[in-house]
Image (tube, helix red, strand yellow):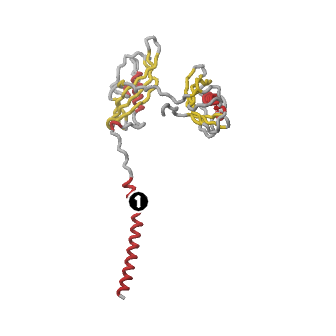
Amino acid sequence: MPDARLESIVHTAARRIGRVLGWCVIIASPLAVIVGLVVLRQSPPPEAPQSERLIEADEPQGWAEMYVRSWLSANRDDSAGLEAFYPAGMKSTRAVGTQIPVDTSTLSVRSPRPGAWSVMVATDIWVQQPDGKHRAKLVCAEVSLVGNGEGYVATSLPTPVACPHTLAAVELDYPETAELNGPIGQSVHGFLLAYLVGRGELNRYVAPGTNIGAIVPPLYAEAQLLELRTHEPFEPGQAARPLDGTEVHATARTWGYDGLGQVTTIDYALTLVARAGRWEVSRIDPVPLLAGE
């Protein structure tokens, strides 16, 4: 009897211990998952050094651009509000109208330390020549600013610097010449007339489901297709009998005529797809195909 009673006690204790261990596993499982996620979670990448950090668009780029415009506009009769940016001001001896800023754009913004910025601004200006005519010129300048949430002030006048270099011309990957009056050329020309001039139904020239809408109001009074090249080669007559779904990548150079008959030269990189024996534009490519890619 003692042995039987002892065996019963042992079995009862074992069941209780088993239940306790089971609950421990149930309770511990979510904790283990949470701990695992915390341990395995990647640490955020280290921030770039302050001197290399690019500033977000809500920093004083616009203020710097207006300062450069004011600096380039100042003449002997008008300071162009320069003191609003640089309280020390500047006495200009430039004659009125000899230098006219047309447009400005921020190229880079860096913060060497909190509350200080260096902004590189590019400006298109018209500069009067000895013959009295104005010619376009590109000027780049660094602007040094300090400030806080209440405002900014320039530490000095803008400093002219070298503009970024223009790299060598790239080679596009459209080796084949397409006929302007061929099947692809007719579709491209019809598309450009509908898209740029507003002549004809654009839906006739774009593939179904393509999100391309006509420019309103039209940019030009007329469009002339000058050159058409394709990435894909075609055998004679093959482009006139395309299989449905066949794609072709093309680049089109066009003249756009305004209401005065003045011409603007335009380039388009397009992807066309064949459907029901004709070519339709499926996409205006944001970047043309480059040779070697």
Amino acid on which disc 1 is placed: Val
Q: Which residue appears at 40% of the width and 18% of the height?
A: 77
Residue 144, image x and y in percent?
Answer: 34, 30
**Residue 71, image x and y in percent?**
39, 23
Q: Quadrant of residue 9?
A: bottom left
Residue drawn where x is 62% and y is 39% of the image? 245
Residue 6 pos. (x, y %): 35, 83
67 over 274 or under it: above or below: above
Q: Residue furthest right?
A: 276
258 relative to 83 in the view: left or right? right
Please, what secondary structure does the residue beneath circle 1 have? helix
Q: Is residue 285 visible to the viewer in this orientation of the structure?
A: yes
Q: Which residue is mark 1?
A: 33
Image coordinates for residue 159, horizontal then vertical, percent: 35, 25
The answer to whether residue 221 is visible is: no
Around disc 1, counting alpha carbons within 10 Å, would you say few (fewer than 14), some (14 to 19), or many (20 or more)?
few
Total numbered labels placed on residues in the image: 1
In the image as oriented, which residue stretches furthest toward the front?
235
Quadrant where the image shows the N terminus: bottom left
Which quadrant of the figure has residue 162? top left
* Residue 19 shown left or right of residue 252 in the figure: left
Horizontal side of residue 231 vs 138, given as left or right: right
- Asked whether 207 or 74 is in front, the reply is 207
Residue at the far bottom in the pictured view:
1
Residue 28 position (above or below residue 221): below
Q: Nearer the viewer, residue 218 or 85?
A: 218
Q: In this orientation, which residue lies closer to the viewer: 180 or 120?
A: 180
82 w.r.t. 148: above or below: above
Task: Choose top left, top right, bottom left or bottom right for residue 117.
Answer: top left
